Amino acid sequence: MKLHIDGGLPLFGTLAVDSSKNALLPIIASTILTDGVTVLKNVPRISDIENLLKILVSLDIKARFKNGDLEIDTRNIKFNSVSPEIAGKIRGSIFVLGAIVGRFGQSSVPYPGGCAIGSRPIDLHLQALRDLGINVTEQNDVITCKRKNIKTSNTTTEVFLDFPSVGATENLIMASVIGNKRVRIINAALEPEVEDLCNFLKSCGAVICGQGTSTIVIQGVKALTATTYTAIPDRINTGSYLIAVAACGGEVTLTNTIPHHNANLIAKLQKVGCEIKVDGGNIKIKSPIKNSCHKESKSNLGFLKSLGCVHTAPYPGFATDIQSQLAVLQCKSRGLTTITENLFENRFKYAGELGKLGAKVCVKSKSITITGVKQLVASSDENSPTVLVASDLRGGVSLVLAAICADGKSVIHNAEYIYRGHQDIEKDLVSLGANIIREDG
């Protein structure tokens, strides 16, 4: 799949943000724990979700999209081992580990796949499950879990996470909500997606306290019922589109957002010179770049301000999933910016591609140093566009942002990575004034 982009245009208009991929994946997996037909509203048809549904179907669960909603019928669910072929395509397959053992008392799941952005060890997941009292074995790239028989007890099982891992927290929650145990998770992840999973499970009858804090307490129940639920808006896609406007110039209102989920990024965008107004679930952003990137207005371009130093961190710190997009913005800043990646070691693969557009970047160890330039420039020859190659989801999105704000013509190869997290990124940006054509195949 390729994206053909003719950049240098400002962005104007209004755009509604889809529901969050990172919230929906564990929520969809957790329907394994329920009995009945769950309806999830406003679910984007992205490849990560489609692949996760294949895992559910292998458990004799029925799933179908209907008018933008996703219906999941678990009434005939059966225990089966998960296919390595399907699990290898999606990092989110790790979420079924806790859900299946929570429902059946046992699970057999191959190691997950996903983007190659680092080692992404699942040691925290497995150790947390062991601390919960589950026997975990690893053999031939397959993780097998079996829950021990637990007698009714008034005591509480405490699980301490050495690092507030989102996935490990979510797996612990799913493995604990059914049964007769009381579980306290300490140093739980604070990400909004964890809180959303808890809210979904509570709507199914789970007993959970402390969601949104670092200590989550779960009292197991006998069974969970189906429900109707709408996941939170995607804060990463929200951030990507805010950065797109800041980099291209223009004025855009994003609807269906939860602004405080992007408070860290909004503060940074205001620091570089953007005007941002928040009204309920709407975020309006106006770029400081005057007259955008039109060739006839280059002399009137305004530089963005440098952020100096940025460090990625667990929520509410600066999100690793928005790091590469912010780097694109800082390519057009005045001065030096250093972004340090503290979560994944291979998240700078996009840097060399930005260099093809004239960006001045230097990667060293865990940091990327960016020297701002007045303008990113792509090829002026429509028959020979600048070729950019995506190697992961978020890095691929950063290349889209770089290409639409650069003067000239680009083509992004391996664009299928981008559609792991965006249903219609090209349609979204075209609706705001960008010039993008998607080529399938």
Image: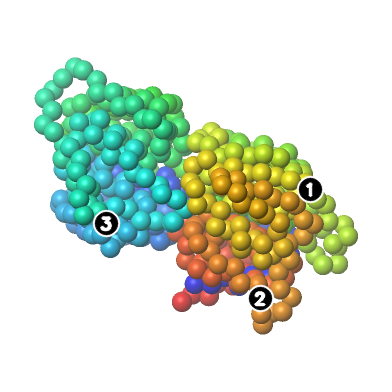
Query: What is the secondary structure assignment of the residue under circle 1?
Result: strand
188 horizontally vs 145: left or right: right
The residue under label 2 is: 385
* Vertical placement of residue 381 versus 230, above or below: below
Q: Is label 2 or label 3 in front? A: 2
Around disc 2, counting alpha carbons within 10 Å, would you say few (fewer than 14), some (14 to 19), or many (20 or more)? Answer: some
Rendered image quadrant of residue 127: top left
Around disc 3, counting alpha carbons within 10 Å, would you say few (fewer than 14), some (14 to 19), or many (20 or more)? Answer: many
11 horizontally vs 233: left or right: right
Query: What is the secondary structure assignment of the residue under circle 2?
Result: loop
Residue 334: mark: 1
Residue 137 can be seen in this image: yes
Identify which residue, 198 or 148, lies in the foreground: 148
Whole-percent x and y of residue 13? 68, 56
Three-letter amino acid code at disc 1?
Arg
Q: CA distance from mark 2 to mark 1?
A: 27 Å
178 horizontally vs 313: left or right: left
Mark 2 or mark 3, earlier in chain: 3
Three-letter amino acid code at disc 2?
Pro
Identify which residue, 40 or 25, lies in the foreground: 25
Residue 36 can be seen in this image: no
Residue 55: mark: 3
Identify which residue, 118 or 326, lies in the foreground: 118
